[in-house]
Image (cartoon, rainbow, N blue to C red):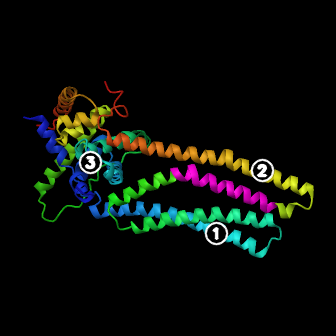
Amino acid sequence: MDNLNDLIRIWRSAKVDDLPATQEMIGLIRRYRTRKMMKKAAMVITALAMLSLLAGTVFFYPSTLLTSRIGEGCMVIPAVILLSSYIRSLSRAYRLKNASNIDFLRHLQEGQRGRQRYYKRTQPVCMILLSLGLLLYLFEPLHDRLSHMVAGYGLTGIWLCLNWFILRRRAIQQHERRLRKTLDQLEALQNPEDKSTLYEENE
Amino acid sequence: MDFDAIYRLYAPQIFRVCMGYTNDFEQAKDLTQETFISVWQHLASFRQESAISTWIFRIATNYCLRANEKAKRNRLTAWPTDAPARSDETQETREILKAEQAKLRWLYACIAELRETDRIIISLALEEVPQSEIAAIVGLTETNIRVKIHRIKERLSGKFKDHGQFE
């Protein structure tokens, strides 16, 4: 009696009918794509809402000082930059809706590189403009009384420091961790000779 | 090779390997799905330095090992056994199928008693994956794999004999 062949015969008797069919699996993958698209759409809607809020404030409470006008301009520019980059990204993703898996994956990888550029260049420029814009815009409502200026600029300064030195740094670290994890995963999957991840405890 | 063809060719094998590793029907299904989502995600970046089957089995076994801790916390879901009998099945056929299922459950139970890496090695061996490929997936030498398969096979056969399954 060949025991291994007996074992193989038993092993092969397992029914695999309950597995999702190819079409169902492709459906699962499409849902994964949709989730990615929804995230981008949510970002665009948020950016649009913020831009509308800004435009509404400017329209209903028109400013008189030049500092306020410059401040408004400084805040509108980064909002437009962010909105246009999100829309570009969303339209690229929409065009790829029916593209092959390979094209879609390429798009995701490009997006990943784009995010790196965003954290290194676009985001600091936008934050500098927004901070400057806010400080200039606040001058008009606060300049009448010294106590208001001290309190207003003090709070704004704390808020800007919190954004620059804590929230932004944390967001970048989180992004880098995610990127590192993805890259490690990719390397582990692509390098069949890499043994360190799995079986070092074995022998 | 496109995703469709890959899925049709490897999904049953991957499911059986996951089932051998987890001995849990629902978890094996989930792991198979996760494996193929990962295959789809990374297909374009696959550098073809190894056979595609090695790569896919590697992803699946990675997922199995990662799922281990989770599995220990969860209750196992048994292989569904109450499938309705087909009208063309005779009593004799049903008895044979029932006996086959009992043997399969016993095989999974025996494999579940093995160490994690041994579970993966024997699952791949039972899928008739070449030993060189198992070595590449697991990260051991081919000689080591050959010895291990021999020992595991002896152990499983012994258990089967003790249980009267090969009579």
Verify CB contact (< 8 Å) between mark 3 and mark 1: no
Q: Earlier in the sequence, mark 2 or mark 1?
A: 1
Residue that carries the numbered disc 1 in the rendered image: A49
Residue type at mark 1?
Answer: Ala
- A18 relative to A3, above or below: below
* The residue positioned farthest toward the front in the image shown: A66
Asked if the magenta segment contains residue A121, the reply would be yes
Give the CA separation, mark 3 to mark 1: 47 Å
Magenta span covers which residues? A116-138
Give the Cα separation between the discs numbered 2 and 1: 24 Å
Chain under disc 1: A
Q: Nearer the viewer, residue B55 or B33?
A: B55
On the image, the x and y values in percent for residue B3 come to 27, 57
Nearest to viewer (mark 2 / mark 1): 2
Of residues A18 and A146, which is closer to you in this image?
A146
**What numbered label is drawn on residue B14?**
3
Amino acid type of the residue that numbered disc 2 sits on in the rendered structure: Gly
* Residue A184 highlighted magenta (yes or no): no
Q: Chain of mark 3?
A: B
Q: In the image shown, does B163 or A179 lie closer to the viewer?
A: A179
Residue farthest left in this picture: A1
Task: Nearest to the eye among marks 3 and 2: give it.
Answer: 2
Mark 3 crowdedness (10 Å alpha carbons): few <14, some 14-19, many ≥20: many
The image shows residue A137 at horizontal and vertical percentages of: 78, 62
B88 relative to A1, above or below: below
